[in-house]
Image (tube, rainbow, N blue to C red):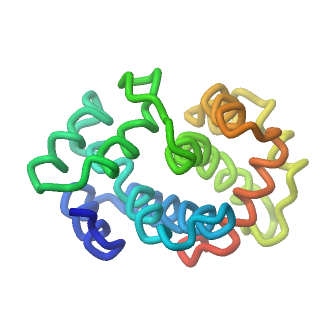
Amino acid sequence: MIPTPEEAWNLLTEYNEGEFHQKHGRIVGDVMRWFAEQLGYGEEADLWETVGILHDLDFEQYPEQHCIKEQELMRARGIDERVIHATASHGYSLTVDVKPEHEMEKVLFAVDELTGLIGAVALMRPSKSVDDLEVKSVKKKFKDKKFAAGCSRDVIRQGAEMLGWELDDLIDRTIQAMRASSAVE
């Protein structure tokens, strides 16, 4: 069974009560949908969004088992292995050996950390918005390891490499995707 985005949201909120994790799930879901449509996977946009929403399903309650426990939780509900593999793969080389293989998984791997960094950069701007955010502003903060230190620059770089994209291209596309998200304020 592949959950609809609405079913994915209900499952996410069952395991994540905090506003931060819920909002992050919404943003990553929206960003994944945008990429699905931009990369020619429009017919799978719901799947991509669902994967984005569910990728941190276990993070709030099981941070020490991140990307491991969520596989168990989803299997217990009969969720399709494509969703399970995709969500787990964003923890590749960090918490699991599940390698991103499909383009959807590589996008998730790349944008999960990057959406956090972009969001943090946007909050520092007078507008507090991604609407007027430029790649050069993100790149400047990307180089500052102390800024949004929890956002792994190595993972973002690895994600761009997996996709065969330049880092600037990944940042630009992700900014565009976040501008299209209703979850980004």
Name which quarter of the figure residue 22 lies in: bottom left
Horizontal relation, residue 12 to residue 169: left or right? left
Say how many tags the image has. Answer: 0
Residue farthest to the right? Answer: 136
Horizontal relation, residue 38 to residue 168: left or right? left
Residue in the image at 74% along x and 37% along y? 164
- Residues 116 and 79: in front is 79
Counting from the top left corner in percent of width and height, residue 98 is at 38, 29
| Quarter occupied by the C terminus | bottom right
Q: Is residue 99 above or below residue 172?
A: above
Q: Is residue 149 above or below residue 46?
A: above
Counting from the top left corner in percent of width and height, residue 40 is at 64, 65
Name which quarter of the figure residue 59 lies in: top left
Counting from the top left corner in percent of width and height, residue 104 is at 53, 50
| Quarter occupied by the N terminus | bottom left
Residue in the image at 70% along x and 36% along y? 147
Name which quarter of the figure residue 88 lies in: top left
